[in-house]
Image (cartoon, grey):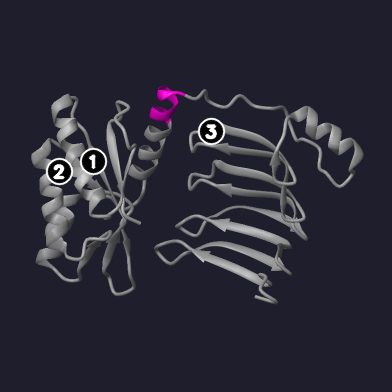
Amino acid sequence: MRSGCRHGIAHTWHKNGVLASEEPYQNGLPHGVCRRWDEAGRLLGKYRMVHGTGVQRIWHDNGQLQVEVSMVRGQFCGGSRVWLRDGNLISERIYLFGRIVTAKEYRAAAAENPELPRLRGRRGMPLANGRSTQKHIHRVFVAGLLKKRHCCEAQEWLHRAAKHAPAHSLGRFKRQADAAKFVQRLYRAGAVQVIVPDIYRSKAGEEFADGLLVRLPKDQGARKSIRVVCARFRTRRLGAVEPDQDIGESNLYLSMA
């Protein structure tokens, strides 16, 4: 920091300790080559910023571009796009110094201000809003979690920890026994399977997870019973449930980060 502003190189790390991003700053603005890596240390991509001006990017762990946003002196200016990991465009907006505008309004401003970047490429067609799109977005999200290298059935994972050190820690549960009881309640309510996705380890060998995937049955009564269990989970402030309402999803995601 310098005078309350970022100045130097900012790093972030994945939960497994691998470097996730490297972003150089100068007097509070991104300046230099920014890089991002996946959890295995593979370079996903890089981009260059000049005193806060350029196109910032974020990638999904499969290499698919996730976010692309144009900046001028640290403010959103130009096109901004967001994609799912399957390549589907879900959002496209145009900003003029942080304000959302139409393409016509932006081009008129750009004709008078040479500092503004041109709109890049042809405008896409984001997925239409609606239940089917919500379901698709959630399905792609779940598929991405299941492709993580370290996943395990929840009872098996917690039972293995009870028999052998080192310990396993699930989200905000204070004890492994409490986590195990919660998983049992999900199964008794009718869950087809409860999976611990994206398990990560400390250097001492301890294992951690920040979420659960609950595979749902088709029976509506059982689905409601599972959501009752999850409602208590939220009431105890142990985490969030996605999606928050039934949209015909095949899996519930319980986030405990």
Q: Which amino acid does label 2 sit on?
A: Leu
Dot 3 lies on which element? loop
* Circle 1: element type: strand
Residue 59's label in the rendered image is: none
Asked if residue 11 can be seen in this view, the reply is yes
The answer to which of marks 2 and 1 sits earlier in the sequence is: 2
Kind of residue at badge 3: Gly
Our reading of the magenta stretch's main secondary structure is helix
Residue appearing at x 50%, y 36% in the figure: 84
**Which residues fall within the magenta stretch?**
130-136
Which corner quadrant holds the N terminus?
bottom right
Whether the magenta-drawn stretch holds residue 133 is answered as yes
Which residue is farthest bottom? Answer: 2
The residue shown at (56%, 67%) is: 11
The residue pinned by badge 1 equals 214
Residue closer to the observer: 15 or 172: 172
Residue 87: assigned label: 3
Q: Is residue 256 above or below residue 230?
A: below
Which of labels 3 and 2 is toward the front?
2
Q: From the viewer's perspective, tell me whether residue 196 is left or right of residue 28.
A: left
Residue at 29%, 26% in the rendered image: 248
Q: Name the residue under label 2.
A: 186
Marks 2,1: beta carbons within 8 A: yes
